[in-house]
Amino acid sequence: MNTTENRYRNNGRKAVVFGAGKIGRSFIGQLFSRSGFEVVFVDISKKMIDDLNRHRQYKVVIKSDAGDEVLWIKNVRGICLTDTVQVISELASSSVAALSVGQQGIPEALPIIAKALILRREQLGDAPLDFIIAENMRNADQYLSEELGRYLPRDYPLEKLVGLVETSIGKMVPIMSLKDFEEDPLQVFAEPYDTLIVAKCGFKNPVPEVINLAPKENIKAWVDRKLFIHNLGHVTSAYLGFRNHPESLYLHQVLDDPEIFKITRLTMLQSADILMALYPEEFTSSQLMDHIDDLLSRFRNKALGDTVFRVGCDLYRKLSPEDRLAAPIKAAISLNKPYDLIFNVLLAAINFRATNEQGEYFPADIKFFSETLFGINHILRNICRLDLKV
């Protein structure tokens, strides 16, 4: 344990993390564990849970051009989501909780969370519980408040007892090869970036002492910074890179093309201009330019081995109205700002056909491909919800 981590002691603190996937283990779980919390993962995968309970530790391999660094994450265990009685019991007595299951997994977790909140109130009275929402989605707190409220009694004081803490998740975690997975199913690869940006005002309890936690007053601006610059820049390099270099597997390979690098940077700058117009008090031009150049350096991290396929796939989600391309375009239209470069990326996305290392498409994208047969305007209108025509 290093000198920073020496400041943290468990003192009976427990963090329940829904989702033992890549972000859950490499980011959320490891920050809580290194900060002195016992980490209890809740996941649908019985094998993952069995492995966690057998070893009670796992490793995060930090990938950078300077070489690999291994972090051993200890004091962890797991519960299957289907073991609802135990999940409810653990969550009801937890110090803090986190949600990192992906948007598709949230509906399955909500009824269990609601039952745990009811039990917690019976056992502990009006003791609030904070949920760190480690999901890349806009207005996540509002969405969860509305959905969670469906499963709680009408007189349950949700706003008083449940902190719904939005985040901006900036950590990049690549798809691991089958060989790496077979070598150690619990290990996970990640980049060195380790800052967890959270909504300061979302907590009902004092902000927990967690390594690399960065509370922000205006979290909406920081969520949009992630979406409008990081996510947008990431897919820009993938979609334009695939269009020009369909044979390239890795993101760093397409960014080695000076023209792809240049257009990606210019597209990110165009989106940064939209972002500054939305939040004039939050960011400066020089801050966002530095952020863009840092991101481009991170995108080119060869050791991370991030693929064009991983960054670009899941087209229904990535072209949806509140995601990385349609959202800044909508904002640009309302602000009367240029968005031609971003729109060019969206058009390239419609023709994105990258496959994984096994030559397979992302499953949901196969249905998306069939929708493109109805034309670009069909995609713009029905998937992006943009009132534009080409």
Image (cartoon, helix red, strand yellow):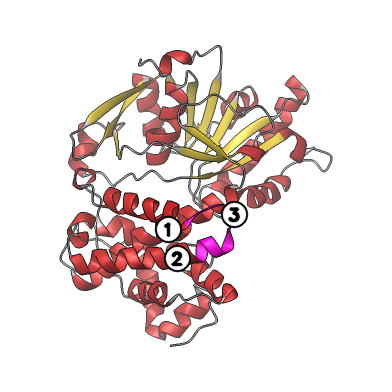
Query: Is residue 213 toward the left or the right of residue 50 in the image?
Result: right
The image's mark for residue 281 is 3
How far apart in space, not on screen, are marks 2 and 3 (Cα)?
17 Å
Q: Which residue is rendered at x = 38% and y = 43% of the image?
A: 171
**Image: 290 above or below 31:** below
Q: Tell me which label, 2 or 3, sits earlier in the chain.
A: 2
Secondary structure at numbered mark 2: helix
Query: Three-letter amino acid code at disc 1?
Result: Ile
Question: What is the magenta range?
Answer: 274-284
**Category of crowding for the residue at label 1, using alpha-carbon neighbours closer than 10 angstroms: few (below 14), some (14–19), many (at least 20):** many
Query: Three-letter amino acid code at disc 2?
Result: Ser
Q: Which residue is rendered at x = 70% and y = 26% of the image?
A: 120
Q: Nearer the viewer, residue 320 or 277?
A: 277
Query: Three-letter amino acid code at disc 3?
Result: Glu
Secondary structure at numbered mark 3: loop
Q: Tell me which label, 1 or 2, sits earlier in the chain.
A: 1
The image's mark for residue 229 is 1
How far apart in space, not on screen, are marks 1 and 2 (Cα)?
6 Å
Q: Nearer the viewer, residue 118 or 254?
A: 254
Q: Which residue is rendered at x = 63% and y = 22% of the image?
A: 93
